[in-house]
Amino acid sequence: MTINCDNILVDIINNKGYDSMMNDTICAISTPYGEGAISIIRISGSSAFNIVNKLFLSKDLNKLRTHTMHYGKLFDNKTNEIIDEVMISVMRAPKSFTTEDIVEINCHGGLYVTKKVLELLLTNGARLAEPGEFTKRAFLNGRIDLTQAESIMDMINAKTAASLKMANQGLSGSISKLITSLKDKIIDIIGKVEVNIDYPEYDDVEVLTHEVLKPTVFSLLKQIDEILEKSQTGIIMKEGIKTAIVGRPNVGKSSILNLLLDEDKAIVTDIAGTTRDLVEGNINVKGLLLKLIDTAGIRNTSDTVERIGIKKSYTAINDADLVILVLDYSSDLTKDDKELMKRVKTKNHIIVVNKVDLPKKIQLIGNSNYVMISTNEETGIENLKSAILEKAGVSDYKKDLTYLSNIRQITKLKEARYSLKDALESIRDSMPVDLISIDLQNTYYLLNEILGIQSTDLIIDELFSRFCLGK
């Protein structure tokens, strides 16, 4: 499946002239480029069956039942040479991914044979699909909405079980239902406002006052705030959390990195200043993607190269979402330790005390919840992982995976919130209800944009479907 959601969004936002393109029959290689056991070439459009029929002489695709697979040989219809033995899947409109006629050719996975099959399709009337065009057609034909299209891309890029589950939730329509529920409540309020303005003579119309509107709009605003708060967890679960491991030399930073990664990524020695540059690696910690950065030990030094590494360490602290500060259980707190404790105080951080297998010399400051570990004996690492989840705010993420985890969706919901807040302010200021209705309609438009729905005339359609105004 060749998908590029960025291209999909750009085309939709810019309203590219894709109406005529929708009449084309498109094709593309849907499996990764390279040699493999099989390759799949997908064809979608009204001429899909006729184009493949020119090359597949074994059976007439127009006479085959939908959602069936058939064996046969693919020919070059100009030279009459056999190209490959293939399996062909037939899916008739509208019960397909794009809602169009689709044929999928499963051929052997060699580079030459795959390109040859694609070339034959192109020379017999198909057009090479643009990036993301199959998904674009599914969206434009009403098969999926924009949040589901984005979830497909999230599914492909998922790096943890949690991010995969979130993508599956989005693809199943859970985000759509969440936004649609808000839309229904907004349109219900708008409908009542419009009826009060235009049809005041109806006896059964509820007379709306500011006091009636205020609690309803306030409740909606609260719901949006809760969704936005949860969305931060969604972003973390999807994108991961950038985590810097910092401390002075020889406290065990590289050992912690290696234990978390379960590999010897960083060099570990007793020589101070061994790590002179940032060492990075990714790890799945109980469903959370952790982007680990092992930094150079921070101390005063005259070594030019080491000083560059230390400067990078300070930058890593500033850029990190989470800082793990490592202290030495078997050593007194130094000036560098105390300076680092002050520096990370304003950051989301965990203080880890390593080398608890050695005699204690450290005098811990304050009432911080220190994580006690021994990288030498490999103890306390699970406690550190749990502390990371807690600090990331995702320790109970499994309770509900219906999160907005897409910046575009979150941005539009924030804009909808601002518009709804304006409506609430207008209510509190006793502004005319027709002015309040403008803010409510704008909120509705913005919610529609999350789903990729054009809002023009939709409000009118919704109003007439809910109110029998001509009776």
Image: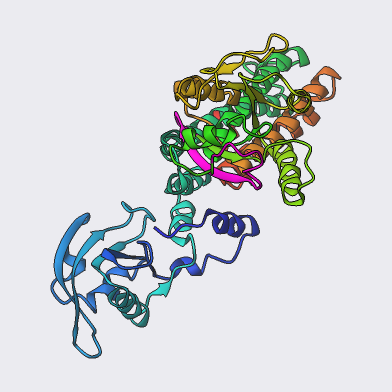
Residue in the foreground of this view, choosing between 365 and 185 = 365
Residue 448 in view here: no
Quadrant where the C terminus sits is: top right
Q: Which of the 4 image quadrants contains residue 370? A: top right
Query: In front here: 415 or 390?
Result: 390
Q: Where is residue 335 in the image (x, y as percent from the top left)?
A: 79, 25
Report the front residue among 159 and 355.
Answer: 355
Magenta span: predominant SS is loop
Q: In this view, does 120 lie above or below 7?
A: below
Q: What is the quadrant of residue 273 in the picture?
A: top right
Q: Where is 216 relative to 337, above or below?
A: above
Region rendered in magenta: 268-288
The residue at the point 60 percent across, 40 percent down is 293
Q: Residue 455, how many percent across, how many down?
A: 62, 44
Name the residue rendered at 59%, 26% in the picture: 392
Position in image of residue 271 (x %, y %): 61, 39
Which quadrant does the N terminus fall into?
bottom left
Residue 146 point in image, percent of width and height: 52, 46
